[in-house]
């Protein structure tokens, strides 16, 4: 008889360590910790970079497109230009353009077209004296196309400035006069006006020089009769010769800002603007060589503007009627002193 031995007691069965499983690597915990830790560290780093980049992208988006909080799209202090558009020609054009007007002046001697800048919401407009000198009727067209009849409130032929008042006007867009004493050679500028009747024309350039002596005629009706046949410019003298008609005996010299922003006939009285959207000059004269047919050949980058500080100093006088027409034949500088030198002579635009 065969006797089957009882199965061994479980506790007595020798069991090899990790029986039924392959032995793990000797440094398994360390390896597992490294592999788990590295992705976490990388993800944290990526998240930090993404957050930083995202914040920068958001800042740039708000800064240059105006998206985001109202603080970034609000107008910069002392100007009409939003901070998001600060320093761009398009931003200046959009902000200041509505305050630049086209002026049509007529008299028995003919007609002229120029530009102007709205200073007050009730219709004060600054322009050049030579745009409206001797005019019987003055019409002003806004950028919206609406036209007003204007009264000449005061003129200062010595500084080639005139102040108009639009009849029955209110709530008009306005421009801010800046400080021309802060202007430096090389500053970027924008010019807006109505050359050849093309309202709202925008050009840009830099300040080329300061304190240029510019001489133009200030006699009434000079440059109106026949001016269209000779390029449309105000009479001027250069190199001992007269252009665009006889300049007459009455002339004026003033200190001007020189710019290479393109100016053409019709820009007179328009705005020269800094990149903050402030008016730093009233465009008044340009030089252009004669073309073969005797007319002006267009802008060659020699334009001139009456400094805004001269305008501001003259406003009270203009509001009281101005200084009247001086026919002494000798102009005055912006500081009121006479000047008998032979300065550069240009012609009004």
Image (cartoon, rainbow, N blue to C red):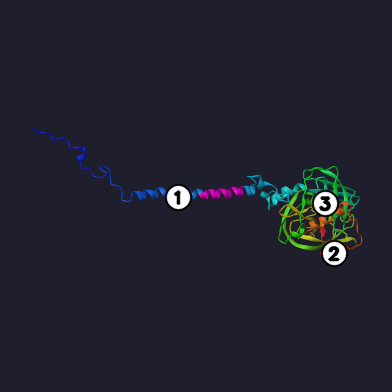
- Residue 47 lies left or right of residue 95; in this view the side is left
Q: Is residue 336 shown in magenta?
A: no
Query: Circle 2 sits on which residue?
Result: 241
- What is the distance, in whole Å, between disc 1 and disc 3 at their CAs? 66 Å
- The crowding category of the residue bearing disc 2, from other C-alpha atoms within 10 Å (few below 14, some 14 to 19, many at least 20), is few
Q: Residue at x 88, y 49 (%)?
A: 152
Q: Which residues are magenta?
A: 48-61
Q: Is residue 10 above or below residue 125?
A: above
> Could you say where residue 144 lies in the image, as x and y percent from the top left?
77, 43
Q: Element at badge 2?
A: strand
- The crowding category of the residue bearing disc 3, from other C-alpha atoms within 10 Å (few below 14, some 14 to 19, many at least 20), is many
Residue 281 or 37: which is nearer the viewer? 37
Residue mark closest to the camera, 3 vs 2 = 3
Query: Circle 3 sits on which residue?
Result: 126
Residue 259 or 332: which is nearer the viewer? 332
Residue mark closest to the camera, 2 vs 1 = 1
Task: Answer yes or no: is residue 209 visible.
Answer: yes
Query: Circle 1 sits on which residue?
Result: 41
User: If the image is split into quadrants, where does the N terminus sit?
Assistant: top left
Task: Answer yes or no: is residue 301 visible.
Answer: no
Q: Quadrant of residue 257?
A: bottom right
Q: Residue at x 77, y 51 (%)?
A: 176
Q: Quadrant of residue 182?
A: bottom right
Q: Residue at x 76, y 46 (%)?
A: 98
């Amino acid at each position: 008889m065969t006797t089957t031995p009882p199965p061994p007691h479980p506790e007595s069965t020798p069991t090899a360590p990790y029986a039924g499983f392959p032995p793990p690597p000797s440094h398994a915990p360390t390896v597992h910790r490294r592999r788990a830790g590295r992705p976490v560290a990388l993800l944290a780093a990526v998240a930090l970079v993404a957050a930083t980049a995202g914040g920068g992208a958001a800042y740039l988006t708000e800064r240059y497109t105006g998206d985001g909080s109202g603080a970034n799209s609000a107008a910069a202090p002392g100007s009409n230009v939003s901070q998001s558009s600060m320093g761009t020609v398009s931003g200046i054009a959009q902000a200041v353009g509505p305050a630049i007007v086209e002026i049509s002046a007529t008299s028995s001697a003919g007609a002229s077209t120029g530009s102007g800048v709205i200073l007050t919401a009730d219709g004060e407009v600054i322009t050049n004296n030579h745009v409206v000198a001797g005019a019987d009727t003055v019409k002003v067209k806004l950028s919206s196309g609406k036209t007003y009849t204007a009264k000449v409130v005061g003129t200062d032929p010595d500084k080639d400035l005139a102040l108009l008042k639009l009849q029955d006007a209110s709530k008009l867009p306005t421009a801010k006069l800046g400080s021309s004493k802060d202007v430096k050679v090389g500053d970027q500028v924008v010019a807006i006006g109505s050359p050849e009747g093309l309202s709202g024309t925008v050009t840009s350039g830099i300040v080329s020089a300061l304190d240029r002596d510019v001489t133009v005629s200030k006699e009434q009706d000079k440059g109106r009769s026949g001016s269209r046949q000779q390029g449309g410019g105000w009479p001027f003298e250069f190199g001992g010769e007269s252009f665009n008609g006889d300049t007459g005996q009455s002339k004026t010299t003033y200190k001007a800002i020189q710019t290479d922003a393109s100016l053409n006939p019709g820009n007179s009285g328009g705005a020269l603007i800094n990149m903050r959207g402030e008016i730093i000059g009233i465009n008044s004269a340009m030089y252009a060589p004669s073309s073969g047919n005797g007319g002006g050949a267009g802008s060659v980058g020699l334009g001139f503007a009456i400094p805004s500080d001269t305008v501001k100093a003259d406003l009270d006088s203009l509001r009281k009627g101005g200084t009247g027409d001086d026919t002494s034949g000798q102009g005055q500088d912006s500081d009121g002193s006479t000047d008998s030198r032979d300065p550069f002579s240009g012609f009004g635009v």
